[in-house]
Structures are given as C-alpha cells and as structure tokens.
Image (spheres, grey):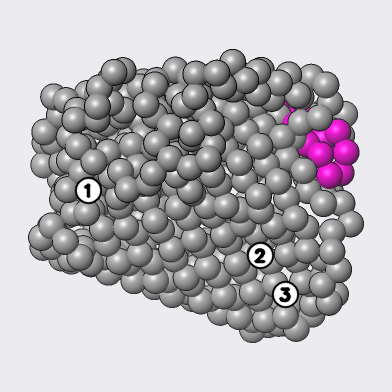
Amino acid sequence: MCWYDSGPGVLDRFMTQPANKWRAWGLLAMAALWPALGHAQGLGSTGLPVGGNGLKVGEGRLHPTFDFETRFDSAAGYFPPPGDSGATVSGQLSPEAVLHIRPGLRLELPGSKVNLDLRGYADYVHFTGLLTPGSTSTSHMEGLADLKVTFNRDAPVSLELNNHFERSDRTRSVAIGAGVLSLYNEVSLGVPLRPGGGAIDVVPRVFFGVERFKPLAALFPVGCGSMECDPAGVVNFDYSNLRASLQGRWRFLPKTAVVVDGQFTYRNYSQGGTPDALVLHATAGLAGLVSPKIAVTAKLGWGQDFGASAGNALLAQLEGTYMLSHAATVKVGYSRTLEPVGAFGLFRDDRGYLEGQALLGGRLTLRGVTAFDYVSFQGPRRDTVFRLDLGPQYQFERWLIGGFGYLYGVRSSTSPGAGINYSRHEGYVRMTVTY
C-alpha cells in the first residue's frame, strides 16, 4: 500500500538497510513462536475477565493496552517494481510482511447516573520490505476509538451518546477495492424508552457521519484506468451521512418479541457529481427462542430511494443461532440490504454468512466466520466477495492473551482493475497485554 505523502521514519530506515534484513526476519520468527512459549495474546471477545488492576480513575479503571502483531498479506498493496525509481507502480497487488504496533487504552467509569466506556488504539502499520523491496516508505498510521456515554441507564427514559472514529485501509465503501485509506467518524444520539415495565422498548436515534478516502498510491497502477484505482478518483466517493432511525421491540411472550426497524438516510457527496440519496428502510418481524437452544430472527421490509436514482428493493433478514452449550454457538443467516454509494448511486447486497465460536477449558476460544456477498450496483456492474476468517486465542493470564489466525478473501467484478479483482491470503500472530 503506497501512502504517497508519508516519508520513511526510523523503522523504515532500519528495515531498508541490508545488514538489518536478517534481524527483521529474526524479529518475525520470534513473534511467530511467542504464543507457543506462552507469551502471546489476541484481540477478541472471549467472555472472560480481561486485564490487570489498571489505574483507578474515580469509581472506574483505566487500562493501558499494548498489541503487537506480525502479518503476512499476499495482497498488501501497489508498490514500485524492484529496482524502479518510483516512476511506475505495479499493476498487481504485491505481498508483504507487515508489523502492527498498537498502543491503546480502555477506560470504564460505571455509575447509576452516568456510565462512560472509552476504548481505542493507535496503530503503526510498518511494511518491512522483506517480500517487496521499496514498500517501507508506505508505512503509515491507522487507529480506532469508540466512546459511549449513557445517562440514567436503568431508568424508563435514558440517553446514549456514541462516537466511532476509525482510520483504516479496509474501507466501508463496497465500490472501492484494495489500495485506499479511509478516514471515518460517526456520532449518534439515542433516547431509549422503556414504557410498560420493560415489555416495550422504543429507541429513536440520530446519526451524523463522514468518510473521506485517500489513495495509497500516488500513481496509476500499470494497466488500470478505472475509477477505483485512480488516485484522483477516490475522492468521488467522499460523503457525509445524516440518518434518523426508530427501533421498537414488543415482548408479547417471555422469550419472543415483535421487532420493527425504520430509518431514513440523507447521503451527500462532496465531489464527483453523484446525486444526493434519500433512502428509506422499513422492516418488521419476530425475534426470539423457538426452543431452549435455538434462537431465530426473521424480518422483511422495503427500501426506497426518493432521490434521483429512484431505486428500490425488497429487504430481508433470516438468522438462526444454535447454542451447542453454554460456551459454544453456531449462527447462520441471510440478509438483503439496499444502501447508497458514490459514483453508482445505490447497491443491493445479498449476503449469506456462517459464524461459530466456542470457549474450551475456560481459556481457549475457537472462532470462525465465513460470508459470501453478491453486490448489484445500479447499472451493469456486479461484484462477488467471499471471506473466511479462522483462528484460536488463549488466555494465559487475565492480562495476557495470545492468538493467531488465517484470513482468505476472493473478490471479483464485472469491472476491470486489480483492486476489485483479486484473491488474498493473510496469516497473523498477535499478542496483547492489558494492565
């Protein structure tokens, strides 16, 4: 991934010196062996208490965290060919060994009147140059932060304020493939209402979000002239989003509820001339237990764009969860959504997915996720996306978890361009310490 306005730092210069190549390989090997020695940790939800004592802040705790990950990525980005001065960029996604260094924090301030939860990290993504020489100058910063503040959490009327910030090379735009960096932020305000002793939940919310895109290559990849790989073209997908939603749940039986979800989205594109979107979603259905071990959600509805595209689609969700035991579940489902997107107006996503997770011996978590998406854009473009994510993690101590994983992805499109037609293998080893 070629971050065109960042120069090499100290780590970059270290990795580009030939004498240090073998030291870098040693670093990767040591990190790969770390979990086997009992000194690794993976991120993820285990359902177990995680973290040390932390630092006392009022009635809560501040937990500093540190995460170190080594990752092999077979389609890490577009880089200059070996020996090239940088005047051209390879037309194919190239492999690389990548280091992720993530210092972070978790702040929890519980309270009956005000409850605050803050989690986040900064992520230095370092391209080592071990597999594709010349990639080190593309190293860059990513990060994530989630803030949730709840007022009067257990009262019949409460207030929730949320903010999600993320900078990543895995964008939210389904139209853009690999090789793009996204800066995303969304703030929301919700007012959960619980009249009737809790049998009815009504939650109106309003959201405002923005996403800005930046190319990870300063030049056109060789042989690609389509918008998704044009460094000047990705700004056409920049947008701001104003969304209002209303969610309702009525528990007419102890373990079964009627669910209603309506939302209206106004999408504005700052560049590129894509017409504004005015999309209404409305769905309704049932959610609950059909047996002590099987939970089902079934919803049906309609989506309509009242903007220039005038597109519409039937919306649906059918999901079943089977509880193998108190510590193991399997989930399978299908969903159909309709969403706005830059340059094309709208897209419909038909998605099937399968998820499983099990906690063994109170410390070992096994998980797996697979999904297939068939994406239909307005116009002739059609994309298919397959994803597989597998990996265990083990909690050695409350403050130390180790894990590794494998991810496989295949994307194909009726449009050309390596950024939306590729297969990707990723393997990683990760450790996290939480004080």
Going from N to C along the chain, the mark reached first, 1 or 3, is 3
Q: Residues within 10 Å of mark 2 (few under 14, many from 20)?
A: some
State the extent of the magenta-drawn residues as a range.
Answer: 389-402
CA distance separating discs 1 and 2 = 31 Å
The residue beneath circle 1 is 234
The residue beneath circle 2 is 118
Is any atom of residue 201 visible in this view? yes
Q: Looking at this view, is 305 or 36 the one in front?
A: 36
Q: Looking at this view, is 374 or 202 the one in front?
A: 374
Q: Residue 33: image x %, image y %?
A: 73, 19
The residue beneath circle 3 is 115
Q: Label 1, secondary structure: give it.
A: helix
Q: Residue 272: image x %, image y %?
A: 13, 57
Q: Residue at x 39, y 71 (%)?
A: 208
Tag shown at residue 79: none
Q: Label 2, secondary structure: give it.
A: strand
Q: Is residue 46 left or right of residue 231?
A: right
Measured along the vertical axis of the image, is residue 170 above or below residue 183? above
Measured along the vertical axis of the image, is residue 148 above or below residue 79? below
Mark 3 is on which residue type?
Asn
Going from N to C along the chain, the mark reached first, 1 or 2, is 2
